């Protein structure tokens, strides 16, 4: 039986009482190890706030990129390029008749 990092992280997650496993926990590193519990909670809350602010500042950009990607994928999947090529051929064929 192999010891996989994901399994080790899950076991550690269960031992820690439900804390979410992250890279520091998987590696056994804890930057807040020497702090008392109240100071540790304040530091973790501040860190969470910084991560949330970072994400929210970039959210509109990420939504715009996802919207553009969705539109590009929809256009490609619907065969818009083939439709335009067919219309070009049809208009080129009709041109000499007029």
Image (cartoon, grey):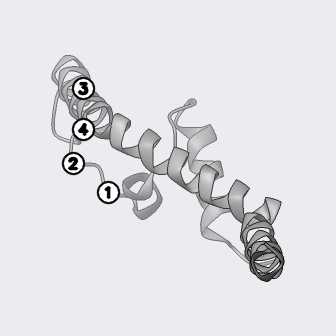
Which mark lies nearer to you, 1 or 3? 3
From the viewer's perspective, is 73 left or right of 67?
right
Secondary structure category for the residue under label 1: loop
Which mark lies nearer to you, 4 or 2? 4
Which mark lies nearer to you, 3 or 4? 4
74 lies above or below 84: above
From the viewer's perspective, is 50 left or right of 84?
left
Q: Earlier in the sequence, mark 3 or mark 2?
A: 2
Secondary structure category for the residue under label 2: loop
Secondary structure category for the residue under label 3: helix
**Which residue sits at x=18%, y=29%?**
43
Of the numbered discs in the image, which one, if any, rests on residue 54? 4
Q: Earlier in the sequence, mark 1 or mark 3?
A: 1
Residue occupied by mark 3: 49
Measure the C-alpha gap from mark 4 to mark 2.
21 Å
**Which residue sits at x=78%, y=72%?**
98
Is disc 1 in contact with disc 2, using a CB cutoff of under 8 Å? yes
Q: Earlier in the sequence, mark 4 or mark 2?
A: 2
**Which residue sits at x=52%, y=36%?**
16
Measure the C-alpha gap from mark 4 to mark 1.
24 Å
Q: Assess disc 2: are there few (<14), some (14-19) or many (≥20) residues with their C-alpha within 10 Å of its C-alpha.
A: few
Q: Position of residue 91 (x, y in %)?
A: 76, 72
Residue occupied by mark 1: 29
Q: Earlier in the sequence, mark 4 or mark 1?
A: 1
**Looking at the rendering, which quadrant does residue 72 occupy?**
bottom right
Measure the C-alpha gap from mark 3 to mark 4.
8 Å
Is disc 3 in contact with disc 4, using a CB cutoff of under 8 Å? no
Residue occupied by mark 2: 31
Which mark lies nearer to you, 4 or 1? 4
């Amino acid at each position: 039986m192999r010891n996989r990092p994901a399994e080790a992280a899950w076991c550690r997650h269960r031992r820690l009482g439900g804390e979410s496993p992250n890279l520091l926990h998987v590696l056994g590193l804890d930057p807040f190890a020497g702090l008392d519990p109240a100071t540790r909670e304040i530091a973790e809350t501040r860190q969470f706030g910084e991560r949330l602010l970072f994400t929210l500042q970039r959210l509109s950009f990420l939504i715009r990129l996802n919207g553009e990607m969705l539109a590009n994928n929809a256009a490609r999947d619907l065969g818009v390029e083939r439709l335009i090529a067919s219309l070009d051929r049809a208009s080129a064929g009709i041109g000499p008749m007029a």
